Amino acid sequence: MAYSDFKLVDLKQRFHLIIDENVALFSETPSVPVSAWLTETLHETLSLALAINTEKVRSELLIAPILVELRKQTGRTTSLFSGVDFSVDATQGLNGICDYIISQSSQQLFISAPVLIIFEAKNENIKGGFAQCIAAMIAAQRFNEREQNSIPIIYGAVTTGTNWRFLQLETDVIRIDDREYYIDNVEKIMGILTSMTGLPIASSIIE
């Protein structure tokens, strides 16, 4: 079993989760201005990504630039991992590949202190990606406990590149934001992502 094999009911039963899907997690989170680089990049890539409309292109042209911007926003004090094996406990099915992991550490050689797990929605089905994302969030929680990283909340996101849904894991409670956020308000998405890292925003990122 791997992250991609889980269904929500499996996760709830196996890990004794409480799932709250009626919460506005980030409605009050302030937007964060993005750099001219990201604005110009998305101006070039958005129409192309929508025209080609494959998961690979959406990942490369939409998701990756936003996450690179996130690293810049935090003064490069976070690390970004893409398409990496994140196997924590194969006996519980907590193993497999994560599309993206954001770590609360600048260490780029290996994963340490994972705080945000991101999966690209398959077939543009965001809800269908929740179980896989939650399973990897549980793995990140256990990883941090094992490494004695004091990170009480793990965050997750499932995205098509243009649409984003966010999740939060605290102890055994999974909260799924009842709102969907869109790339035409990338400043709001960036505000949510930066808040998840728990790190201060760099003072000079607009250029």
Image: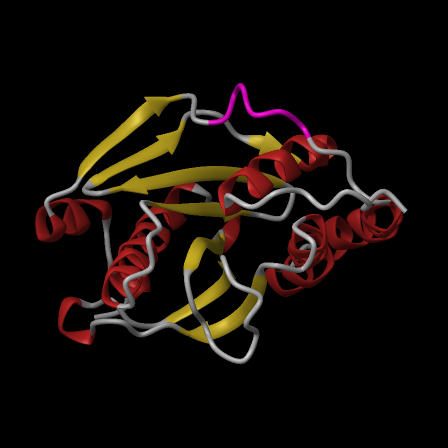
Q: Which residue is painted at 52% across and 20% down in the image?
A: 27
Q: Give the range drawn in magenta.
A: 26-31
Q: Main secondary structure of the magenta part?
A: loop
65 up-or-down from 195: above or below: below
Q: How far across and how far down the image is residue 22, in percent?
A: 33, 21
184 up-or-down from 203: above or below: above
Q: Which colour scheme is used?
A: secondary structure
User: In the drawing, does residue 63 fall left or right of residue 51?
Assistant: left
Q: How far across and how far down the image is residue 12, in percent?
A: 15, 44
In reply to whether residue 30 is colored magenta, the answer given is yes
Between residue 84 and residue 7, name the one nearer to us. 84
Q: Which residue is painted at 16% across and 42% down in the image?
A: 17
Q: In which quarter of the image is the N terminus?
A: bottom left
Q: How far across and how far down the image is residue 187, in percent?
A: 71, 33
User: In the drawing, does residue 50 fall left or right of residue 159?
Assistant: right
User: In the drawing, does residue 47 fall left or right of residue 174?
Assistant: right
Between residue 153 and residue 203, name the one nearer to us. 203
Q: How far across and how far down the image is residue 132, in percent?
A: 34, 55
Q: How many labels does the image show?
A: 0
Q: Which residue is painted at 37% across and 72% down in the image?
A: 86
Between residue 185 and residue 55, name the one nearer to us. 185
Quarter of the rendering containing residue 113:
bottom left
In reply to whether residue 153 is colored magenta, the answer given is no
